[in-house]
Image (cartoon, grey):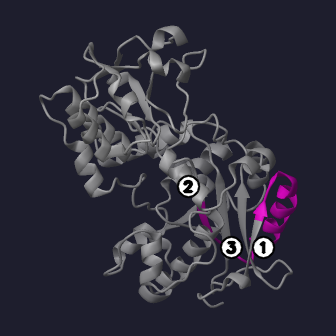
Amino acid sequence: MSLFLKDDSIQIREVWNDNLQEEMDLIREVVDDFPYVAMDTEFPGIVVRPVGTFKSNADYHYETLKMNVNILKIIQLGLTFSNEQGNLPTCGTDKYCIWQFNFREFDVNSDIFALDSIDLLKQSGIDFARNTQQGIDAKKFAELLMSSGIVLNENVHWVTFHSGYDFGYLLKLLTCQNLPDTQTRFFELINVYFPTVYDIKHLMKFCNSLHGGLNKLAELLEVERVGICHQAGSDSLLTSCTFRKLKENFFIGPLQKYSGVFDEAAPAIPPVAEAAAAAILEDMDLMTALELTLRKSRVHGGVTRDSFSSLMLAVTNICARLIDFEGNARKVVGCSCLVIKDYREETSAHSTHDKPISMSNAIIEIASPCCLEGLLRICCLAQHFDTCEKSNHNRLLTLYGSN
């Protein structure tokens, strides 16, 4: 099969709750002859990051992965099957078949998410309303996946790109539990459910001059995308074809010795954005403190934890409508203010907005675009700042713009 596929030669088989059983039956039929399974997932981004001291970067990355996978929900899963020669199954049709599973659990109207990630998925054509109404029940999928022959099978070769989160969500589905506390146990479970795994990001370390993400690598290897970027089916196909091209051009013989090694458990923050977020000063005025908080939250997809211990924020009365009756912060689009929730102790709706909240115990959700007036109406270090001076207005304008 040529790596230069055309759109009309590929059938992306959309899987919903009503056709899940028949599509899983097809997968059972093809997996023995097409044992290379390229996988990609779509999920609501990265919304929290851990605080504290960690023994290594790997521990920090895993803690980030664990926290996010445990509180978030998978949106899509893409699977592309191929054989040793790179051929794809046709399933009795005149087209090559790949699968895209659409899940119902994530609700864009009530669940937490990173706004930039969801905006990107919307732009890529994911219909969240249809997912909610017709999507796959995750528990039902997990049951069928366990008996499909593609997990717990050492003859199946999983192919991924920077796949810590992908496997995290699958393990959460398969075990019906949160991820384990330690990275060691996490990899033990991966080895049980997915005995043979090739992470392209790790393989790139052994290839001179190759760098970047999946799209950049595919471009360097002259592999063309079929389908829509940031949809799991298309991304899994690109992963499959890129792996095949990488193997043919840079490796001789079996790849077994490269199996089971991941590049990192979590994607890195872009260097420029990371530098801006890290610029924390010892002494600062209110606006500087607020500006740095906004910068860090923007880097982290609209949610930040523990910006710096000296800053204490409280939601003012204008934000009370954004707190539900149980005192939980609501994730909203087009919000005119910050929404803060103290996760350390129970709070009621009427008391949340007038109580200072330590950043070490709180998550701040910032909906974008934000109204500058709402951002300036914040209690900081027990001082009220209700004026909207032109200089301060312009400083925040450079970060978020105005409504």
Q: Earlier in the sequence, mark 3 or mark 2?
A: 3
Residue neighbourhood size for the residue with mark 2, other residues' Cα within 10 Å, grouped as few (<14), some (14–19), many (≥20): many
Give the answer, above or below, for where 118 lies relative to 15: above
Give the answer, above or below, for where 162 lies relative to 326: below
Residue that numbered label 3 is attached to: 81
Q: Report the disc number at residue 104.
A: none
- The total of numbered circles placed on residues is 3
The magenta segment: 14-40
- Quick one: SS at disc 2? helix
Camera-side residue: 102 or 247? Answer: 102
Residue that numbered label 2 is attached to: 166
Identify the residue at horizontal 27%, vertical 50% (top origin).
Answer: 274
- Quick one: SS at disc 1? helix
Q: Earlier in the sequence, mark 2 or mark 1?
A: 1
Residue that numbered label 1 is attached to: 30
Quarter in which the N terminus is drawn: bottom right
Q: In the displayed image of the protein, which residue is found farthest to the front?
A: 390
Q: Which amino acid does label 1 sit on?
A: Val
Q: What residue type is labelled 3?
A: Phe
**Residues at badges 1 and 3 in contact (C-beta under 8 Å)?**
yes
**Residues at badges 3 and 2 in contact (C-beta under 8 Å)?**
no
Q: Work out how far the residue at label 2 is from the one at label 1, CA to CA, in angstroms.
A: 22 Å
Q: Earlier in the sequence, mark 1 or mark 3?
A: 1
Q: Work out how far the residue at label 1 is from the one at label 3, CA to CA, in angstroms.
A: 8 Å
